[in-house]
Structures are given as C-alpha cells and as structure tokens.
Amino acid sequence: MRNISKNMGFILLLTLLGLLYIANAHRGERKLRKINKLRKEVNDAKANYQEVKSETTYNTTESQLIKKLEPQGLKMNTETPILIKPERGK
C-alpha cells in the first residue's frame, strides 16, 4: 500500500498521458475521415465539371447549332459575304 501511495503521482501522470494519446489518435482518425470525404467530393465535382464542359462544347458545335435552329426557320448562310467599301473624298 505504501508503494502505491508513494508512486500515485507517477501513475496519474501515466494515466493522463495514456488518455491524451487515445484522444489524439481519435482526433487524427476523425480528421482523416473528413479529408477523405472532402477529397471524394472534390473528385465528384471535377467529374461533374468535365461532363458539363464536354456537353457544352458538343452542344455549341456548328452542326448542333444548325440542328437546333432549323425548326425556328433559321439556316446557315451559304453565300459569301459582300464587302462594302466606303467612298473616300465625299
């Protein structure tokens, strides 16, 4: 009994250090889980961005625009443009 009471401070210090070690490990694991979750969200957002970018690029091609505008009565101009030269000196 005398040895236990003599080393009580040391035992409490070891207990406190053990609790801090366990708490720190749990905190680290929680942060790792959050990092992995955020990394997955970033990858999903990148994939979504690439999909939207690809779809937008495809939909704005000349052939797709012609297909979309034909029902409205608009069609592509096949004639060459006329160059109008201004008259100088007047």
Image (cartoon, grey):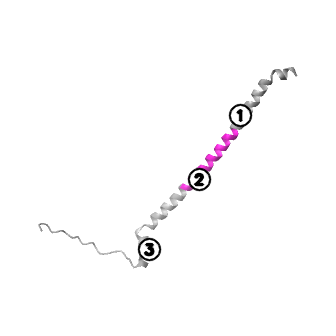
Left or right: where does residue 85 sit relative to residue 5?
Answer: left
Estimate the x, y position of residue 88 in percent, counting from the top left.
13, 66
Estimate the x, y position of residue 46 in percent, counting from the top left.
53, 55
Q: Identify whether 27 is placed above or below 85.
A: above
Residue position marked by numbered label 1 in the rendering: 20
Q: Which secondary structure, mark 3? A: helix
Which comes sooner in the sequence, label 2 or label 3? 2
What kind of secondary structure does the magenta stretch mostly adopt?
A: helix
Estimate the x, y position of residue 40 in percent, counting from the top left.
60, 52
Amino acid bearing label 1: Leu
Label 2 with label 3: CB-CB less than 8 Å = no
Separation (CA) of disc 2 from disc 1: 32 Å
Left or right: where does residue 33 sit relative to residue 61?
Answer: right
Amino acid bearing label 3: Lys
Q: Which of 3/71 is in front?
A: 3
Left or right: where does residue 11 sit relative to residue 58?
Answer: right
Mark on residue 3? none
Q: Identify whether 10 is placed above or below 58.
A: above
Closer to us: mark 3 or mark 1? 1
Label 3 with label 1: CB-CB less than 8 Å = no
Which comes sooner in the sequence, label 2 or label 1? 1
- Residue 19, by quadrant, is top right
Amino acid bearing label 2: Glu
Separation (CA) of disc 2 from disc 3: 34 Å
Mark on residue 68? 3
Q: Which of 64/73 is in front?
A: 73
Question: The magenta stretch spans which residues?
Answer: 25-45
Sort mark 1 into few (<14), some (14-19) or many (20+) by Cα contacts within 10 Å.
few
Q: Which secondary structure, mark 2? A: helix
Estimate the x, y position of residue 67 in percent, counting from the top left.
43, 74
Where the N terminus falls, by quadrant? top right
Residue position marked by numbered label 2 in the rendering: 41
